[in-house]
């Protein structure tokens, strides 16, 4: 009888250990942790994508002015006007000194008749800060004495004034 009692007691202990809900709790916790990790990894991927887009937006905002123009656009506009000798169009995109009126600018440009812009090519640009950029320009000038001078990849400065890109006064300096 003692043997039967010990056998039943041992059997109860063994079967009780197998049905103990405590043994599945670690499994549930591990599964929950795995699920949480998967969710967090997905959230990190989403945030990385949003960060990448935000960086692209910042670069766009830094390069485009309130009129939607880049420094390259403004230099192109300036040189097209210079080739046509359209001083008014040049003046609009040129950062002249505050005390220089359009009339004074026009008079100074009319005096510069010893050089003629023959051709130009506006290359890439770099925004160095929020309000300063460099545009690389190749151009050919013909002087009144017959000399033809070609400048290759000259860095021209642009500045942002009141939200608009402008060719900096004396851009090659």
Image (cartoon, rainbow, N blue to C red):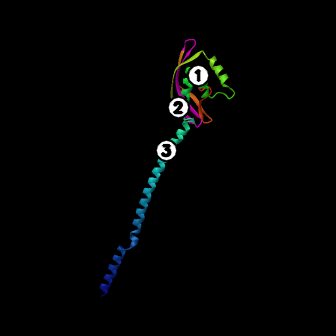
Tell me where residue 76 appears, x and y as whole percent: 54, 27
Question: Helix, strand or loop at disc 3?
Answer: helix
- Residue tagged 3: 53
Decide if residue 85 is on the left or right side of residue 4: right
Residue at 31% x, 87% y is: 2
Task: Please say if the residues under marks 3 and 2 sit with CB atoms less than 8 Å apart.
Answer: no
- Residue tagged 2: 125
Q: Which-is-in-front pick, marks 2 and 1?
A: 1
Residue 85 is covered by the magenta coloring = no
**Magenta residues (range):** 124-147
Residue at 55% x, 27% y is: 77
Tell me where residue 28 appears, x and y as whole percent: 40, 66
In the rendered view, would you say 126 is above or below 84? below
Packing grade of label 2 (10 A; few <14, some 14-19, many >=20) is many
Question: Helix, strand or loop at disc 2?
Answer: strand
- Residue tagged 1: 86
Q: Is residue 152 visible?
A: no
């Amino acid at each position: 009888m003692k043997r039967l009692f010990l056998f039943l007691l041992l059997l109860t202990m063994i079967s009780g250990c197998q049905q103990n809900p405590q043994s599945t709790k670690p499994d549930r916790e591990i599964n929950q942790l795995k699920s949480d990790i998967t969710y967090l990894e997905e959230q990190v991927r989403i945030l990385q994508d949003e960060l990448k887009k935000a960086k692209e937006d910042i670069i766009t905002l830094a390069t485009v002015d309130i009129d939607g123009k880049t420094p390259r656009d403004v230099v192109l506009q300036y040189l097209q006007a210079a080739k046509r000798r359209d001083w008014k169009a040049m003046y609009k995109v040129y950062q002249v000194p505050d005390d220089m009126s359009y009339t004074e600018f026009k008079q100074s440009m009319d005096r510069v008749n010893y050089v003629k812009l023959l051709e130009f090519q506006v290359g890439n640009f770099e925004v160095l800060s929020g309000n300063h950029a460099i545009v690389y320009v190749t151009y050919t000038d013909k002087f009144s004495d017959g000399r033809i001078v070609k400048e290759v990849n000259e860095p021209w400065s642009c500045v942002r004034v009141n939200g608009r890109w402008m060719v900096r006064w004396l851009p090659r300096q």
